[in-house]
Image (cartoon, helix red, strand yellow):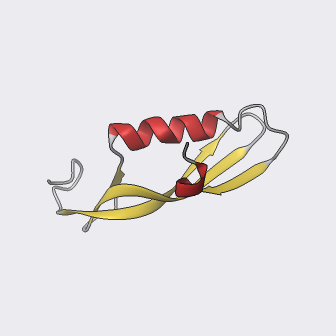
């Protein structure tokens, strides 16, 4: 697989994913991804992206300003 942006080679890796909601910043650590060796761009599979959406949505009504969670422990 080649990177969409720079056409570099891709490799399996992990990354952190941060989302800013109205009242909360959610950081999900150690998210599985495919990362470009050349430019570092990270891509998520549909399954991982759906799970990230679910994790982030669970903090929408939270009273927490900053939430840092590990992907593996936040999955259902």
Residue 43 locus on image (x, y percent):
33, 49
x, y (%) of residue 52? 51, 42
In the displayed structure, 1 sits above or below 11; it is: above
Identify the image quadrant of residue 20: top right
Q: Is residue 30 left or right of residue 1?
A: right
Residue ID at (60%, 49%): 74
Above or below: residue 76 compared with residue 7: above
The image shows residue 21 at horizontal and vertical percentages of 68, 37
Q: How many marks?
A: 0
The answer to whether residue 76 is left or right of residue 43 is right
Figure check: 39 above or below 66: below
**Residue 67 on image: x %, y %:** 72, 52
Q: Residue furthest right?
A: 63
Residue 15 location, quadrant: bottom left
Asked whether, in this view, residue 2 is left or right of residue 55, the answer is left
Q: Residue furthest bottom?
A: 37
- What residue do we see at 41% from left, 44% from top? 48
Q: Is 52 on the left or on the right of 14, as rendered?
A: right
Rendered image quadrant of residue 34: bottom left
Residue at the image point whose x is 34% and y is 37% from the top? 46
Q: Which residue is at the far front? A: 76
Assign the C terminus to one quadrant of the image: top right
Relative to the observer, which residue lies in front, 56 or 6? 56
Which residue is drawn at the image coordinates 62% and 53% (left, top)?
27
């Amino acid at each position: 697989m080649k990177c969409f942006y720079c056409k570099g080679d891709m490799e399996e890796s992990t990354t952190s994913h941060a989302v800013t909601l109205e009242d909360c910043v959610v950081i999900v650590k150690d998210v599985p991804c495919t990362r470009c060796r050349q430019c570092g761009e990270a891509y998520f599979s549909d399954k991982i992206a759906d799970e990230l959406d679910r994790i982030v949505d669970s903090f929408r009504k939270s009273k927490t300003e900053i939430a840092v969670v590990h992907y593996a422990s936040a999955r259902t």
